[in-house]
Amino acid sequence: MKTKQWYESLFENYGQKYDSESFTQGTTGECDFIENELNHDKSLTILDVGCGTGRHSIELTKRGYSVTGIDYSESQLARAIEKAEIQGLTIDFQQQDARNLTFKNEFDVAIMLCEGGFPLMETDEMNYKILQSVTNSLKEQGKLIFTTLNGLFPLYHSVEEFCSLASTEGNATYRSNTFDLMTFRDHNITEIEDDFGNRKTLECNERYYVPSEITWLLKTLGYKKIDIFGARLGQFSRSHKLTTEDFEMLIIAEK
């Protein structure tokens, strides 16, 4: 039997608790930014990759957009479907692996926010495969908006300290962080309590990227215009220049 990766175990039975995590509280502001990037054109189709409990999919659907949400986790999707039904919304939520999406030239825009898949994969090749698969899902003039971990941050700051300051009681905790300068991966012990009150201790590692890497990866996939900014929770903006103080970066790429 295949051993589960840490991110598979993390998102099992975590749909309700996930929505109370501190990093999920910026949905409205983030969707305001997405709308501005789309010039409020409701005819555009949106693919939400790693949609989790559907917070962006639901908010954008409420605003009149056609959204398809995909995620690898059954329990996250079940929570997304439940939330959409409660609000009387019909959203196409599908269980898919972001590395092997079934779409080809179908969407005007793809969003991939809050580390829903990229950059959690265990190898750089797998992370690249997500970018490749999402790109293939976009139409010829498609646009990709995503956030990822800023590799400049751990060079100047303690990731463990940052995470402990951002966390509130009952949220996931992160300890024993070790940032590897050769791989730009942060290895840590993540502890969460799932929706059933079970405590989980997971050995995690996440890939941090520097802006030049992201630019190169996206150029190899055919993107012509690539803009990178500092990502601030619920306050995405093109005016936020990326600095070493930003834990995440916001990338907007156009074919």
Image: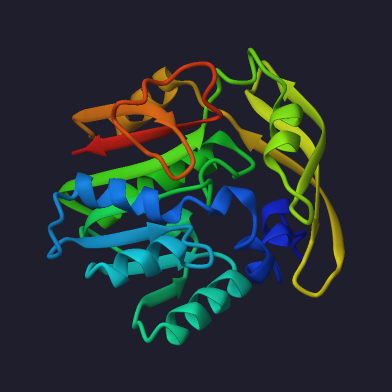
Q: Which one is nearer the viewer's eye here, 180 or 236?
A: 236
Determine the residue positioned at 57% across, 29% down.
208
Is 188 on the left-hand or right-hand side of 139?
right
Say whether residue 139 is left or right of residue 190.
Answer: left
Above or below, 29 against 214 in this view is below
The answer to whether residue 91 is above or below residue 241 is: below
* Residue 250 location (% of width, % of height): 40, 34
Q: Is residue 41 above or below residue 164?
A: below
**Which residue does the image show at 71% across and 58% down from the upper left?**
10
Closer to us: 254 or 17 = 17
Q: Is residue 8 left or right of residue 62?
A: right
**Residue in the picture at 36% in, 25% down:** 240
Residue drawn at (40%, 18%) of the image: 212
Hey, which quadrant is residue 88 in on the image? Answer: bottom left
Quarter of the C terminus within the rendering: top left
Residue 232 x %, y %: 46, 35
- 220 and 67: which is toward the camera: 67
Question: Taking the image as drawn, is residue 133 in sight?
Answer: no
Query: Residue 83: percent from the left, percent from the top?
Result: 49, 78
